[in-house]
Image (spheres, coloured by chain):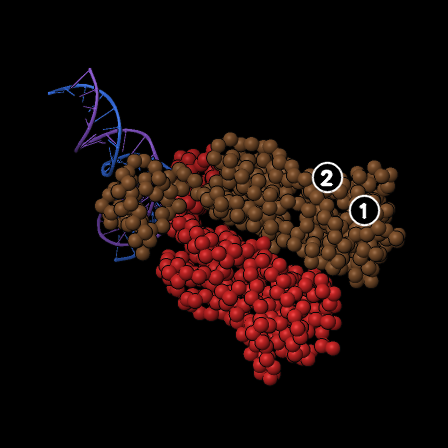
Chain colours: A brown, B red, C blue, D purple
Amino acid sequence: MKMTIYDVAREAGVSIAAVSQVINGKGKISEQRRQEIVQVMERLNYQPSVIASALTGKKTFTLGLLVPDISNPFFAEIARAVEDQSHHLGYSLFICSTDNKKERAERYLSLMQQKRVDGMIIGTGIANKSTLASLMKGRAPVVVIAREAKLAAKTVIIDDYCGGGLAASHLLEQNHVQVGLLSENEEVSSSRERIRGFVSKWNEAGLNIGADRIRICGDELVQDGKSQAGELLRGPNPPTALFCCNDLLAIGALKAAKELGLRIPEDVSIIGFDNTILAELTDPPLTTVAQPTKQMGQLAVDSLIEMLESGEKNDERIVLQPELVIRQSTAIKR
Amino acid sequence: MKMTIYDVAREAGVSIAAVSQVINGKGKISEQRRQEIVQVMERLNYQPSVIASALTGKKTFTLGLLVPDISNPFFAEIARAVEDQSHHLGYSLFICSTDNKKERAERYLSLMQQKRVDGMIIGTGIANKSTLASLMKGRAPVVVIAREAKLAAKTVIIDDYCGGGLAASHLLEQNHVQVGLLSENEEVSSSRERIRGFVSKWNEAGLNIGADRIRICGDELVQDGKSQAGELLRGPNPPTALFCCNDLLAIGALKAAKELGLRIPEDVSIIGFDNTILAELTDPPLTTVAQPTKQMGQLAVDSLIEMLESGEKNDERIVLQPELVIRQSTAIKR
DNA sequence: TAAGGTCAATTAAGCGCTTAACCTTGTTAA
DNA sequence: TTAACAAGGTTAAGCGCTTAATTGACCTTA
């Protein structure tokens, strides 16, 4: 049942080298021989072992993708884009959810290396400096996606700072003055940038945001978003608008507001980030800043494969532009 | 930079066999030697090649998961559960989205075999009979998840028929008489069963459902759900309740109803299936039939690994119970 | 007619590991 | 004192493939 190249060779009455050459379309074999061999392979339902061929110094045609959580719609969309493009170019994909946990990330990273992936796409923070260093020195090229890495690696990202600004401008146009911000964990660079961009634009307009108005949420995004938003909205001088660093946090904020009996957007405007599938489903549909996930996934794979085929490392940054998507969760302040 | 077992052996002044034994915790080596070897491995940052060890007749410690679409929240949740359990038991996971396309499924299946995965979890329909047959004859054991396969394979599933009944009972209790049903593609067995279960319960109550009230939707679930629901609601004698075979279709139905100015649940009740993260985010939150995704993913992996470790094929069916989750999209008919 | 070229296929080494079989040395029991 | 054995290692074959080097048959050309 387990066919090897020897079985095919014997059946076809040729050497294994001939079979190998047919499989890889290399070397010189007459068209007739080729046909014969192909037929034998089909008849025996022979599936060449990528394992063995990888061992012979070639590639595994496998990539690795690290994300915080594949069940988070944003990363699921990224993963789908990465999967499609990888597959399109002939590669399979290991997908790994790290939960932003250092140990999980390291374990996965090491596993990927042991399995000799040809390249890796990292969409999760990696805390440990020495892990990073050895990662970059490893044999597999690396592309960072949707995150700023503290290392010289190819990076595909949006201009998060600008994205934060977009949200701020939108709220400023609507005359909001008191805002609250919900950020992810400090480690998440994209979140930091979004906040920076927002605050800077806000300051430009001559307005201030008290430090207590910027809330850091934990890993339970919806849950924590809800409780942090709740605190802000129940506090003294509550904000009339909330900027949330991702859609999940915004959903938490929506819940908090509703629970307090506030109407959205009449009483409080809420703006998210990522434009995941969720954003158009919420009540009301969420105004949010969109990332071109499809394009990002594709570009990441293209860059990675270009690197591993050319053999040259490349640490350019590809910066895409975010876009404001206005739905019904924001309105002019009354 | 690329360390092999030879490098380690040379550095440690032992044979490669000794190193191999340390790596695998087998054979006999004194504690002292072991320690020395371990230290050398760490110093050299040696990562054993799973590729080479797989070739020596052992396993790849890799599983494959086929789903229709990883960016569909239901499958993303399944995938996350499968990933966690696989990882927990020491396996990596290839994730493949087939879009329910025959060619994609076959291509992926063949790829998985060439990459010598130790086992596969199939969550997508596979049309071709001969593909199925050769799949089952292959070296890798197979577990089917969330779907009925037309083959003797281990299956982890919920009682879809019963789930459909649950939805029907709920609507019957609310005095609905005119209903519309939204189903996925005919090929999707779970969908068929849900419809069967619903219809049967409905008939038991002495009520009938016209064939034109059961609509088959295409692959663009939200989109198609919306248009089919729209047709039903705009038609003569419109239904006062809609049963949708998954949450995505239900979301389409919600959109259609809103667009027609209908209030939910006052004018029309809508009930979904799967209880994905989406269900609690819609407006109003969706009444739906829940599947225990986490548990299903875990059980699938456990069964698979048990099979491949024991070497015995096993085609039991594990049938879990669905559960009705009542939210605010359904109400007594007025 | 011999030297050189082509074409088509084969030979054989080697990729990095595992493992059964074997070898040494030291210990034990009769 | 010696046969028997355990403990701790080593040797070497082989997993299924790729590929550079080689071979042999046949054809040119001067």
Residue position for label 2: A161
Looking at the rendered image, the quarter that the N terminus of chain A falls into is bottom left
| Residue that sits furthest to the bottom in the current view | B206
Nearer to me, A289 or A110: A289
- Identify the secondary structure beneath mark 1: helix
Q: Read off the chain for label 2.
A: A
Which residue is painted at 82% across and 54% down in the image? A268
Q: Quadrant of the rendered structure where residue C2 is?
A: top left
Amino acid under disc 2: Tyr
Compared across the picture, whether B38 is left or right of A180 comes to: left
Compared across the picture, whether A51 is left or right of A219 comes to: left
Which residue is painted at 47% across and 70% down in the image? B317
Q: Quadrant of the rendered structure where residue B200 is?
A: bottom right
- Give the total number of marks visible in the rendering: 2
Instruction: Give x and y (percent) for residue A153.
Output: 59, 35
Instruction: Give x and y (percent) for residue B205.
Output: 61, 83
Q: Is residue B59 above or below residue B278?
A: above
Instruction: Please tell me the numbered disc located at residue A287.
Output: none
Q: Read off the chain for label 1.
A: A
Nearer to me, B44 or A159: A159
Which residue is painted at 43% across and 54% down in the image? B106
Q: Is residue B77 visible?
A: no
Residue position for label 1: A171
- Identify the secondary structure beneath mark 2: helix
Of labels 1 and 2, the one closer to you: 1
Q: Is residue B144 visible?
A: yes
Instruction: Give x and y (percent) for residue A22.
Output: 32, 42
Which residue is painted at 70% across and 71% down in the image? B268
Compared across the picture, whether A141 is left or right of B276 comes to: left
Say whether disc 1 or disc 2 marks the residue closer to the N-terminus. Answer: 2
Amino acid under disc 1: Leu
| Residue that sits furthest to the front in the current view | B236
